Image: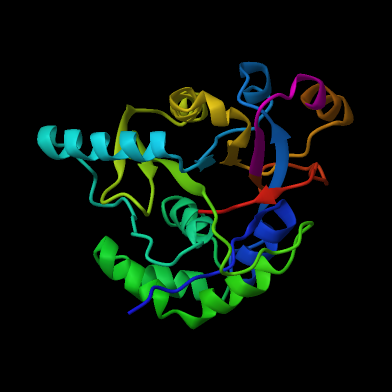
Amino acid sequence: MESQRWLPLEANPDVMNQFLKQLGLLPTWQFGDVYGLDPDLLSMVPGPVCSVLLLFPATEKYESYRLEEEEKIKSLGQEVRSEVYFMKQTISNACGTIGLIHAVANNLEEFGPGSALKKFLSESSSLSPEEKAKFLEEDESIRVTHESSAQEGQTEAPSIDEKVDLHFIAFVNVGGQLYELDGCKPFPIVHGTTTEDTFLENAAEVCKEFMARDPDELLHHNTSVVCPWMAFSKKSKLECQRLAYLTDITVSHSKRQINRTHVFHHAGIMIRC
């Protein structure tokens, strides 16, 4: 049986906000944009950060490393906490949605009444990664919302049959461990210990390792973070633009602890896998 294919989502804050809102995530969490993995730029991201999302090219160099990493972990083993929510990806071009699910499922519990996403997470939490993937294939609410959101944004949606070579993964902090969650890998990858205060810095270092392994594709990486909502002042925006280089960061913020009123946006790029 041929696997399902979805249109890729655009890495645009408005698209992501609308997508999660339609699935029942409360609007206390929003996405906005800042730029770069430079320490000066990371220091401008309000904390605590709860998830980092990385978009990168799935090249031959990456595939070679992925297979080596898988064999090494199978040989040496690793400890993965039972509460880590992890699912496999069996739907082509669904890496954006799966990355968002991984980010939300391992962090946020703020859903409105009748939330389709809350229902999906509740009913799938005890399933295996493979069973979660099958469960997503059969979830009409998420599929319809994804397809609708994929038509939005600032760029024209590609053909559903168009070959894409970019992939989207998530990093989360669960129980003081930094996990890489990639639906195309057989299990979560443990990247060592972390804390609420150092999570962004720790995850950024892993993102830099992805870039270093394939320097010819350096400009095709995109990094995103999820953290409490906070607006950036005009001065901060200009400073971010001045310091920006190589990557851009999408930030999700919670309004609960902040009294500012706006989020800075810039053009998104297409999430592809």
Residue at the (49%, 55%) spot, across then down = 104
Q: Foreground: 95 or 101?
A: 95
Q: Position of residue 220 (x, y in %)?
A: 61, 36
Q: Position of residue 56 (x, y in %)?
A: 52, 40
Q: Residue furthest right?
A: 234
Q: Is residue 183 left or right of residue 152?
A: left
**Quadrant hosting residue 129:** bottom left
Residue at the (65%, 42%) spot, across then down = 251
Is residue 232 shown above or below 107? above
Q: Is residue 43 magenta?
A: no
**Quadrant hosting residue 233:** top right
**Quadrant hosting residue 23:** bottom right
Q: Position of residue 34 (x, y in %)?
A: 72, 35
Residue at the (48%, 56%) spot, across then down = 95
Q: Position of residue 70 (x, y in %)?
A: 23, 40
Is residue 228 shown above or below 11? above
Q: Quadrant of the N terminus?
A: bottom left
Q: Give the residues in magenta.
A: 241-251
Q: Residue furthest top?
A: 40
Q: Foreground: 107 or 92?
A: 92
Q: Is residue 269 left or right of residue 77?
A: right
Is residue 152 shown above or below 208? below
Is residue 218 shown above or below 53? above
Residue at the (14%, 40%) spot, across then down = 74
Q: Foreground: 1 or 50?
A: 1
Colour scheme of the rendered structure: rainbow
Q: Is residue 250 magenta?
A: yes
Q: Can the viewer see residue 47?
A: yes
